[in-house]
Image (spheres, rainbow, N blue to C red):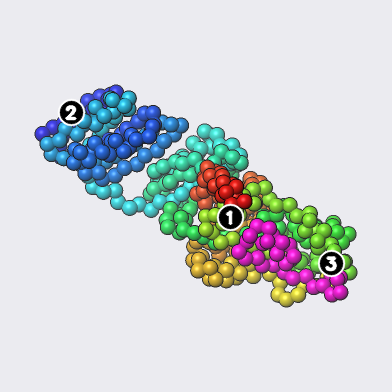
Amino acid sequence: MSYPGATSRGTVKEVTSPETILIRVTGQDRPGITTELLGLLARLEADLQDIEQVVVRHQLTLGLAVAVPTGRDLVKEVLLFGWERDLAIDFEVVDATPTRHIARQVVTVLAPELSPTSLARASGAIAASGGNIHRIHRLSRFPVWSYEFLVEGADLEKLQASIMDIATQEEIDVAIQPHDLSRRSSRLVVLDVDSTLIRNEVIDLLGSEAGHQDEIAHLTEQAMRGEIDYVEALKQRVALLRGSSEEIIERSISRMILTAGGRTFVRTLKRLGYKVAIISGGFTPFTDHLARELDLDHAYSNKLQIVDGVLTGAIDGDIIDADGKAKLLEDIARQEGVPLEQTVAIGDGANDLPMLKKAGLGIAFNAKPTLREAADTAINVPYLDAILFMLGVTREEVEAADASDEKLYRFTA
């Protein structure tokens, strides 16, 4: 028996039963369309094999793969369904073999503005690597634009090489991650502090209060670029604080400025069940303050030696250097029972590189060239909460969580 396969606004072709047919439904979205269509297919005793749906600006695109039951005029019934609801219906006979699993990557593209040219070049790089774009999803329009491409079948090395070239040329940020369970599981996020979670360098704040701003700032810049040994540079900078009153610490804390989006970033991660830690080459009074202020789960940093209310110019205990940061990441992950592949590390300087390499995803945030070139991905916009989009969180989800918390506060206050 045959069915007149057709579109409600298109051509007619022959469809032989039994076949697997792809039904494509497009038109103005409204509540109930999917429910009503699935109810019709159930009454027709069709075997539903696959379904995908997306809505863009209130316009519905719905695809269903169904096995047409013998003796049922499914095409006629579905066309009538579309005609009554002013929906366009297309039919196509497709292979009944289930789609085999293909390795997938998530490509996230982010920038203050994303032009059609930038997106075209990014999608062209995906195609050039042998990848097929399975789905495109907008994540945000504020404070930056970001899109997520779900890619199948790409040669990963070619994809990384080609799309990173495009990122440099178009001045956009791009991240490539495997589309697997680890990306969607609760994670541990570990942040550097200076010039990452906060806009300042705390040793520079202390140096300013102690009257040695220029000397300390110069040493800081050299250390962050990897031009001089980090530990030696830290010892030299702390030595310049010798004889200063401990009051400079509280004055410096009052001058700390959170990076734009930092509070939103941490708050959202906590709501999503992430553990959040900071590991700093700075000093405990600053990280303890941030831990209290932001409800962080872990905070590690160096301890300034103070005797009779005066800084001695030395550090108590072992100094947290680059390798120490990586080791602490491992320790925290072990304490929290989080596999390393489900950890995210974020930093800006050369001393953050081992930590970023150790993590499942290492993100260079407005970083120095040494780190930016070696990290898994780099973000060069000044908003820390933009990293949420690299993790697949949408702006709408952030705002919905904020609204939910506000309602709860009003209810319980």
Examine the rendering and report whether any part of residue 128 can be seen: no
Q: Residue at x 81, y 67 (%)?
A: 238
Above or below 252: residue 145: above
Which residue bears the numbered disc 1? 363
Q: How many marks?
A: 3
Instruction: Report crowding for label 1: few under 14, some 14 to 19, many 20 or more residues within 10 A (C-alpha).
Output: many
Horizontal and vertical percent position of residue 245: 87, 66
Left or right: where 244 falls relative to 158: right
| Numbered circle sitting on residue 4 | 2
Horizontal and vertical percent position of residue 37: 28, 36
Instruction: Say which quarter of the image contains residue 90.
Output: top left
Which residue bears the numbered disc 3? 246
Horizontal and vertical percent position of residue 338: 50, 66
Q: Nearer the viewer, residue 95 or 298?
A: 298
Q: Residue at x 21, y 30 (%)?
A: 77
Q: Is residue 297 magenta?
A: yes
The disc, 3 or 2, on the residue closer to the chain's N-terminal end is 2
> Disc 3 residue type?
Glu
**What are the residue bounds of the magenta stretch?**
283-311
